[in-house]
Image: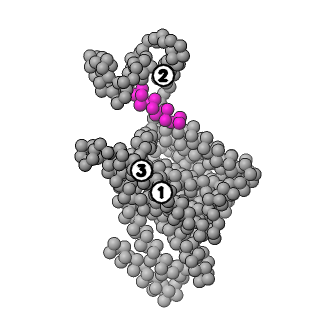
Amino acid sequence: MLFTYALAAALLALRFALARAGVGIWQHLSYWEIASGSIFFQSSLYIAARLAHRGFTLGELGLVVFGATALFMELVNLTVARIWPVTTPYIKTYRLPTPLLIYQLALIPGSLLTGFLLSPLLTLSRHIAQRPVRRLRFPHEKQAHRRALAAGFYLGAALVVGGLLGTWTRWLLRARDPWLWVVLWLLEGARPWTRPALLAYWAVLGSISVAGWNRQLARSRRFRPRLPTGAESDGAAAATGAGLPPGVADEPATPTAVASMFPAVQMPHLAMPGDLGLAAGASEWLDAADRRVPTLGLNGRRKFFHALAVVMFVPGLAADAAFTHLAFSAAFALFVFAEYVRYFALYPFGAAVHVFMSEFLDAKDSGTAVLSHFYLLTGCAGALWFEAPSRLLMYTGILTVGVGDAVVTDGRHRWSATTPKTVEGSAAFTLSVVACAWALRVCGLVEDFSTARYAGIVGLTSVLEAVSGQNDNIILPVYMWSMLAVGGVV
């Protein structure tokens, strides 16, 4: 903390020296803004490094904390302008101070604030879930304690969101009800049904994807090859139910049940009376088909969600960019609460969410928090959240992450001995992004642009993807958007 305050004091002294020398640098910033921004940035660096241990590279940490500081300064400046409107010459925000910005500040920083305020309940929930039963003071009440802590968190979150954040949003909207505003705004699209249809489209795609992956992952675990442990012990276990999960040994030993326990054993079809026999036969046919369908590897699983981002978000940007802006903010807040449920093992969803997400982790998700899905969402949404005047820039994140990064393939010619990325993969990245941008132009979704300059910037982005050790989902969209903004492509 001493270093934090010393650096803030040094920046204040530099601001004073620049003002005395007549240099215009930082003169639009007040001393209070410099001090608060510096202290928040350095405090956020420390907190993020401690809480998300081994979850960030240095570049990712700096980018995330810089974005958090920008949101913090916008939140503070909006609040100050509302408190002292007469003495505030203009609202200092990086984007237009519209209701969309107010809702984003209520959703994203608000979701993090909720976790901070309820951190004692979250910490206790994780402590009890991890601690062996024999080491608890009241082992027979473990589940009751977990349920009580989860109920306390859900109730507290509802109070924080509906009370504190809802009141702040209502105050900034000048006494307009924030919940009613969203409902009415939902019907103010190009047509009254446009935004409800978009919501239904996203809900259907999301539900089908989660349900499909739950089946795919369950099948992958079910038919995973197992090492033989001895015929006699296997036979004994099958006969007595020893070693099976609780409740499985008590189930009737139908052919389907036994085949699911021992997928390597081919069970003959046993005739069963009535509809039960038909159901068992159909289940065996499905199991036989499942064994022959290949399961996707980790890379294929992750690439699926890149393709899903394209299918979900391109129609939203094309039909209603403003509504998609708000939907991205709401999705980020939902991801934050899902991470609370997963990491702190909140009853009853914590285990299911953790098992589902653990199937998509790679070496870059080795920290305490799982960040890849946050990076994917932020990479797709960032170009829209930046509120650039160009429609081409609005699609930058989706094209970079959803298309370019997803089609990168292996090849023969590596960029260097220290990276597995190849020249062929970078070429596929460049060609796919440029082709998709041209398709958007032909469809009239983006304005005319310089193909040569655009292809050159995409090529530089593909090289960065090949040589960088950062997470592509967050680094590439920001880099490409910045290059397009200063490159005069449009």
Q: CA distance from mark 3 to mark 1?
A: 10 Å
Of callouts 1 and 2, the N-terminal one: 1
Of callouts 3 and 1, the N-terminal one: 3
Identity of the amino acid at label 2?
Asp
Extreme-top residue of the structure:
271
Look at the numbered disc 1 and give the secondary structure of its residue: helix
**Residue on which the image places disc 1:** 157
Look at the numbered disc 3 and give the secondary structure of its residue: helix
Q: CA distance from mark 1 to mark 2?
A: 42 Å
30 in the magenta segment: no
Residue 35 % position (x, y)? 44, 77
**Residue on which the image places disc 3:** 150
Quadrant placement of the C terminus: bottom right
Crowdedness near tag 3: few (<14), some (14–19) or many (≥20) residues, C-alpha within 10 Å? many
Residue drawn 36% across the image and 58% down it: 120
Identity of the amino acid at label 1?
Ala
User: Would you identify the image quadrant in which residue 229 lies?
Assistant: top left
Seen from the viewer's position, the closer of residues 106 and 374 is 106
Residue drawn 65% across the image and 66% down it: 176
Over which residues does the magenta segment extend?
211-224
User: Of the residues tagged 2 and 3, which is closer to the observer?
Assistant: 3
**Residue on which the image places disc 2:** 287
Seen from the viewer's position, the closer of residues 19 and 132 is 132
Residue 363 % position (x, y)? 39, 45
Look at the numbered disc 2 and give the secondary structure of its residue: helix
Of callouts 2 and 3, the N-terminal one: 3
Residue 383 % position (x, y)? 59, 57
Give the vertical position of 8 relative to 477 (above or below): below
Residue drawn 59% across the image and 75% down it: 82
User: Would you identify the image quadrant in which residue 234 lies?
Assistant: top left
Quadrant placement of the N terminus: bottom left
Q: CA distance from mark 2 to mark 3?
A: 37 Å
